[in-house]
Image (cartoon, rainbow, N blue to C red):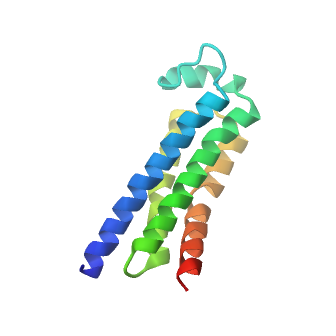
Amino acid sequence: MHPILRNILAVIAGIVVGGFVNMGLIILGGKVLPPPADVDVNDIASINAHIGEYSTLQLLAPFLAHALGVLVGAFLTAKLAASRHMALALVIGAFFLLGGIMAVRMIPNAPVWFSALDLVVAYLPMAWLGAKLALGTTR
C-alpha cells in the first residue's frame, strides 16, 4: 500500500476508533454516574441550565472519555502509519481538540477548572502519550 494512502487511512481509523471510545465512555459514565435530576443530556440548554449541579466525579467522567478516546485514537494512528507517526498522532489530538473547543463554547457555564483541564490535558498531551506508547512497542 502506498505510504500516503496508509497514513490517510491511519488517521481516519484513529478518528473513528477514538470517537467510538469517547462516546462509549461518555455513555458508560452517564450510567455509572447519572447526571443530576431533570437534565436531558441530549439538550445543550438543559446541560447549561444544570451544569452547576454536576459533582466533580460527574465532570471527570467526560474528561476521562475525551482523554482516553484521544489516547486510543492516537495510539492506533501511530501504530498504523507508514511514516510521521508522532505528527499524525498529534493530528488526532488536534482534531479532537477542535471538538473540545466547540464543546466549551456550547457549554460556557461549565466550571473553568473543568474546561481548562479538558482543553489543556485531554487532547494534545494524550495524543503525544498515545504515540509514545505506540512507538515504544514497535522498537
Residue 88 is drawn in which quadrant?
Answer: bottom left
Q: Residue at x 36, y 67 (%)?
A: 10
Toward the viewer: 11 or 29? 29
Q: Residue at x 64, y 47 (%)?
A: 64
Q: Is residue 61 left or right of residue 41?
A: right
Q: Position of residue 101 (x, y in %)?
A: 52, 47
Toward the viewer: 89 or 28? 28
Q: Residue furthest right?
A: 56
Q: Is residue 104 visible?
A: no
Give above or below for 75 relative to 82.
Answer: above
Give above or below for 6 relative to 59.
Answer: below
Q: Position of residue 105 (x, y in %)?
A: 52, 39
Q: Position of residue 92 (x, y in %)?
A: 46, 62
| Number of disc labels | 0
Q: Residue furthest bottom?
A: 139
Q: Residue at x 31, y 69 (%)?
A: 8
Location of the C terminus by quadrant is bottom right
Q: Is residue 83 visible?
A: yes
Residue 34 is drawn in which quadrant?
Answer: top right
Location of the N terminus by quadrant is bottom left
Toward the viewer: 89 or 27? 27
Residue 39 is drawn in which quadrant?
Answer: top right
Q: Residue at x 74, y 30 (%)?
A: 55
Q: Position of residue 24 (x, y in %)?
A: 51, 41
